[in-house]
Image (cartoon, rainbow, N blue to C red):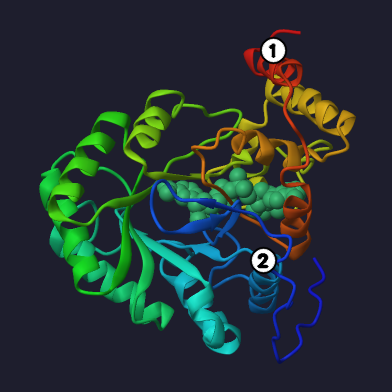
């Protein structure tokens, strides 16, 4: 992929907030952009820095104020935070107060018993490491990345409360928690005086585990919801319609494997693609709008490998009013019936 040269001085588009769309995050004071950018893939120590920088600039120019990281994003783990830290230092220092930057801890990060899961020891020291890599004094949101069956929830949540009180994060969030654990976590955080701002679950046309229980809990509790992998890692785009491109995620070491692109799956993708085309959209645009059709979903957290993908998605956001008929057509395809 050719990477266009990036101009040395970054002056954000002055019109960036004119057309941009935001949703309130639960019952909090924070609004998030309908599209947020995640740095799980394509921002590591092995990726081209100027492409990473161009993607963040493109996103910010389009009114994307929210950037999502985790301690382990790389490879190597930690390198996505380092890349983003360099981009911040070069281009975004004057705009820090216009950005919502999140990171997380929960998955394996360093050897020994304190390098993963949910102890206070791990969560607090991991955030300290993340802040160094990012070159920041604080992040806006700090998440517990996954529930830990062996640590009392009280301990993990009181670590989040401590982190917020210490000023190293402004808000607390949880990710990958089921509905019951979510309810419990919300209660504990409420009692501690640090409300849970947001939940980050996986959600896309192919993976709908949050319907309806988790969404109901978040709605009733006034907690925001930012959904990750809304494009099913690229499956719900035109990327794989004609095979597996060499520069695509499925061709690289990742959780998206060529064997996931089965004939029945690709048949569904093609039929969904036709619905998108019938409405003047790309499949990526249709898939993102579909995740945002429920107002309980605050933001769709996309990944990208090039600036044009971000531009395409933002250009298509809220460009379809889903009729019952279209939603039914999609349901039929997802259910595997004709
Ligand atoms: N909390 C958690 O446990 C968790 C787990 C996973 C992810 N996340 C967060 O969610 C973010 C997004 O996850 P994800 O990267 O899996 O999201 P995704 O949006 O489902 O997939 C992103 C991939 O889709 C392809 N794509 C994007 N826009 C496209 C377009 N317009 N046309 C064609 N292809 C397009 C690109 O694939 P190519 O690279 O092939 O071009 C891109 O890398 C992560 O960065 C991370 O912040 C959180």
User: In front: 144, or 76?
Assistant: 144
Secondary structure under the numbered disc 2 in the rendered image: helix
Place of residue 53 in the rendered image (x, y in percent of width and height, measured from the top left):
65, 76
Q: Which residue is mark 1?
A: 332
In which quadrant will I find the N terminus? bottom right
Place of residue 274 in the rendered image (x, y in percent of width and height, measured from the top left):
85, 27
Q: Could you tell me which residue is drawn at 13 percent across and 54 percent down?
A: 192
Report which quarter residue 65 is drawn in. Answer: bottom right
For this orientation, the residue located farthest to the top is: 337
- The reply to whether residue 169 is in sight is yes
Q: Is residue 242 left or right of residue 114?
A: right
Other-residue count near label 1 (Cα within 10 Å), few / some / many at <14 / 14–19 / ≥20: few
Q: Which residue is mark 2?
A: 59
Q: Marks 1 and 2, how far apart in space?
A: 34 Å
Place of residue 117 in the rendered image (x, y in percent of width and height, measured from the top left):
23, 51
Place of residue 172 in the rendered image (x, y in percent of width and height, measured from the top left):
30, 57
- What is the count of numbered marks? 2
Q: Could you tell me which residue is drawn at 27 percent across and 68 percent down?
A: 126
Do the residues under discs 1 and 2 have CB atoms within 8 angstroms?
Answer: no
Q: Is residue 114 above or below residue 184?
A: below
Q: Is residue 198 left or right of residue 2?
A: left
User: In front: 44, or 281?
Assistant: 281
User: In front: 283, or 292?
Assistant: 292
């Amino acid at each position: 992929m050719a990477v266009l040269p990036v101009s040395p001085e970054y002056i954000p588009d002055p019109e960036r907030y004119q057309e941009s769309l935001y949703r309130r995050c639960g019952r909090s004071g924070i609004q998030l952009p309908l599209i947020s950018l995640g740095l799980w893939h394509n921002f590591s120590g092995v990726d081209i820095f100027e492409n990473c920088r161009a993607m963040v600039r493109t996103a910010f120019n389009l009114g994307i104020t929210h950037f999502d990281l985790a301690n382990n994003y790389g490879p190597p783990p930690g390198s996505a935070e380092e890349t983003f830290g360099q981009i911040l230092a070069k281009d975004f220092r004057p705009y820090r107060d216009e950005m919502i930057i999140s990171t997380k801890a929960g998955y394996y990060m360093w050897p020994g018993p304190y390098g993963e899961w949910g102890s206070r020891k791990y969560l607090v020291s991991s955030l300290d490491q993340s802040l160094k890599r990012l070159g920041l004094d604080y992040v806006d949101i700090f998440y517990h990345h996954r529930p830990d069956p062996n640590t009392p929830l009280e301990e993990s949540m009181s670590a989040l409360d401590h982190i917020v009180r210490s000023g190293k994060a402004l808000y607390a969030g949880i990710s990958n928690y089921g509905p019951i654990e979510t309810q419990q976590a919300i209660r504990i955080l409420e009692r501690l005086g640090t409300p849970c701002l947001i939940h980050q679950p996986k959600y896309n046309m192919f993976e709908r585990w949050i319907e309806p229980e988790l969404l109901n809990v978040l709605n009733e509790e006034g907690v925001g919801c930012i959904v990750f992998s809304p494009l099913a890692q690229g499956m719900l785009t035109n990327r794989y319609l004609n095979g597996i491109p060499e520069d695509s995620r499925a061709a690289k070491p990742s959780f998206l494997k060529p064997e996931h692109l089965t004939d029945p799956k690709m048949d569904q993708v093609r039929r969904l693609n036709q619905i998108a085309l019938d409405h003047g959209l790309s499949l990526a645009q249709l898939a993102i709008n579909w995740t945002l059709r429920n107002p309980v979903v605050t933001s769709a957290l996309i990944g990208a490998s090039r600036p044009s993908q971000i531009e395409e998605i933002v250009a298509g956001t809220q460009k379809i009013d889903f009729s019952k008929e279209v939603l039914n057509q999609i349901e039929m395809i997802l259910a595997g019936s004709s």
